[in-house]
């Protein structure tokens, strides 16, 4: 990004960079799986919150 002239400063950039380096150092993936997990008793509540805007 820096080679493309993008300014890599600011709190948001440094927060992102620190998070990225933490993931690299600890073997975490940078990809989102889309998986949602919850207690079995909470499934209805999770689905209602996730799809409220779609059903209304």
Image (cartoon, rainbow, N blue to C red):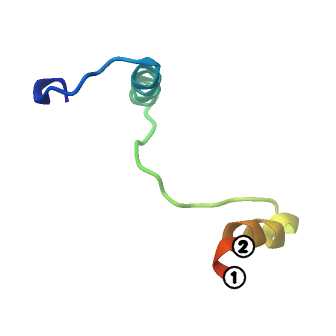
Q: Are marks 1 and 2 in contact (CB under 8 Å)?
A: yes
Rendered-image quadrant of the C terminus: bottom right
What residue lies at 75% left-to-right and 66% top-to-bottom?
49
Who is closer to the viewer here, 1 or 53? 53
Residue farthest to the right? 41
Q: Which residue is drawn at 40% across and 18% down?
A: 10
Q: Is residue 25 left or right of residue 54?
A: left
Q: Is residue 55 above or below residue 41?
A: below
Q: Is disc 2 placed on a helix, strand or loop?
A: helix
Q: Which mark is residue 33?
A: none
Give the class, few, some or many, for how many residues have Cα within 10 Å of label 1's Cα (few <14, many ≥20).
Answer: few
Q: Along the line of sight, which residue is nearer the eye, 49 or 46?
A: 49
Vertical placement of residue 41 versus 28, above or below: below
Which picture quadrant has residue 51?
bottom right
Seen at 44% across and 21% down, the residue is 18
Q: Mark 1 points at which residue?
A: 55
Outermost residue to the bottom: 55
Please, is residue 48 above or below residue 38 in the view?
below
Residue 52 marker: 2
Tell me the quadrant of the picture where the N terminus can be found: top left
Q: How many marks?
A: 2
Q: Position of residue 15 (x, y in %)?
A: 47, 22
Quarter location, residue 13: top left
Image point 52% across, 60% down: which residue? Answer: 34
- Give the camera-side residue of 17 and 42: 17
Q: Distance between the residues labelled 1 and 2?
A: 5 Å
* Image position of 46 (left or right of 31): right
Q: Position of residue 5 (x, y in %)?
A: 14, 26
């Amino acid at each position: 990004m820096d080679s493309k002239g993008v300014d890599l400063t600011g709190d948001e950039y440094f927060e992102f960079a620190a998070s990225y380096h933490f993931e690299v150092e600890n073997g975490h993936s940078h990809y989102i799986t889309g998986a949602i997990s919850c207690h079995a008793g909470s499934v209805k509540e999770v689905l209602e919150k996730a799809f409220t805007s779609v059903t209304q």
